[in-house]
Image (cartoon, helix red, strand yellow):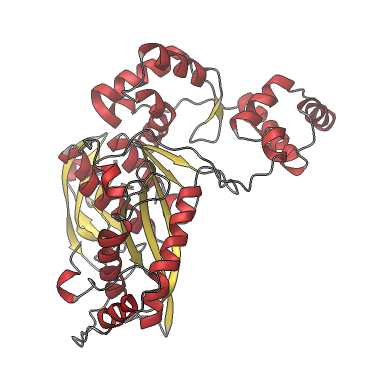
Amino acid sequence: MAPDPKEELAVWRFHLIAEALNPRLTKAERGALVRGIASQEHLDPAGQRRGFSRNTLDRWVRAYRAQGLDGLRDRPRSDRGNARRHQDLIEEAVKLRVERPERSAAHIAEIVFTRHGQRIGERTLREHFQARGLTRAELLRDQRTFGRFEAAEPNQRWIADVLVGPFVPFPKAPGSQRARLFLIVDDHSRLLVHGRWASDEKLRTGQEVLRTAILRRGVPEQLHVDNGAAYSGKELARTCAILGIRLIHSRPYSPQGRGKQERLNRVIRERFQIEAEQVGIASLEELNDWFAAWTERYLNTRRHSETGESPLQRYQKVHARQADPKLFEQAFLWSARRRVSRTASIAFQGNDYEVDPALVGRWVDLRYRPEDLSQIAVFLDDRAFGIATPRVIERHVHTQLPPPPRPVESTGIDYLGQVFADHEADQTGSISFRHLTQKDQTP
């Protein structure tokens, strides 16, 4: 699937200036931040390290405020030749630092010069190492402790994660396989904004969890994710850029700042998962029903030992920013680039579509919901150009989506509810599950 280079560049530019778009910054603070960005080199979508002037960065900030993501679209520059050679040497220097963190920038510069006859300044190397988090102090320091950072208020920082859970029977798979819990937590309040169990780690599942979370709780300023497959796709970066969310990926093998997330995962395993496994899980739908009820009745309403308040009480102290409906609709579409054939048609995902004959021979952008390939919008140079009319539909959903679950007939027996009520009566100090009856399973 060929990406749209203009959109890819616009999304990258947004994430470069995202922090400077924070409305809480004063003029002086924003100026200092932009100067800091301008003082460094940045790896662009083409794989090159480039620097940008403050005037350029300020222009991008103004353009995004005025036009959103469309204001950042442009043709990428062609910085090749010597810049590519220089970047290759930088990458070799980075590998030398990772191989032996004890090596100084001066020593690494000397190794590169000895091998290639081209010298890179020590200061340049130090700047690259610092930008990638590869300073000797960071690499040699014990990184097993979790950070104590806390967002100043709700919706300033959301943390997304995927938790490997219990074995669940799936209709189209032999036996059972482990379910995955996609969850998003508000860093300030510890509120579990939204969570959903799924059959596997798919990019679209992560997007749908984020979509539901925004509908329920508003738009966050930042979204912190790991580098797993569910959060590494360009589709998520595009979603965040359109909605003005700063997407931040954790550095591999660096758990700092995710300590609260790890503690929450432990609570879920020890106080929900163990009970669900104890009584047996009939289906993924049942597991999600239980989890939604447990989250709303216990997890988000219990008094937190560190804050002294329940997550829900602490979260409700701020007015959430709501997404613009038109932007919200566009943010969760996927996009693909195709060339229109001489018969005014395009092939996509095994299907054949008819488009406007005026587009013959042109490259067009397709925007669509991967759950419904019968509705695809066509764009030419960022301008809407009608709908792609299906000629032959062999596939109705995108290949990257998990297959829809087959409905499982319910016996009507509320066995888990009875077991949970008995468990509460034992007074073992565990939480109460007596409210998880059939009528209370609606979140």
Q: Is residue 13 found left or right of 437 in the rendered image? A: right
Q: Is residue 300 found left or right of 78 in the rendered image? A: left
In this rendering, the answer to whether 54 lies above or below 292 is: above
Q: Residue 413 at what x, y percent from top left?
A: 21, 87
In this rendering, the answer to whether 330 lies above or below 84 is: below
In this rendering, the answer to whether 162 lies above or below 323 is: below
- Closer to the camera, 327 or 429? 429
Residue 71 visible (yes or no): yes
In this rendering, the answer to whether 274 lies above or below 418 is: above
Q: Residue 96 at what x, y percent from top left?
A: 75, 38
- Residue located at (40% from left, 36% from top): 151
Quadrant containing the C terminus is: bottom left
- Closer to the camera, 294 or 222? 294
- Residue located at (45% from left, 67% from top): 270
Q: Is residue 46 found left or right of 377 in the rendered image? A: right
The image quarter containing residue 357 is top left
Q: Residue 189 at what x, y percent from top left?
A: 34, 44
- Residue located at (21% from left, 48% from top): 215
The image quarter containing residue 327 is top left
Q: Residue 2 at what x, y percent from top left?
A: 40, 47
- Closer to the camera, 442 or 189? 189
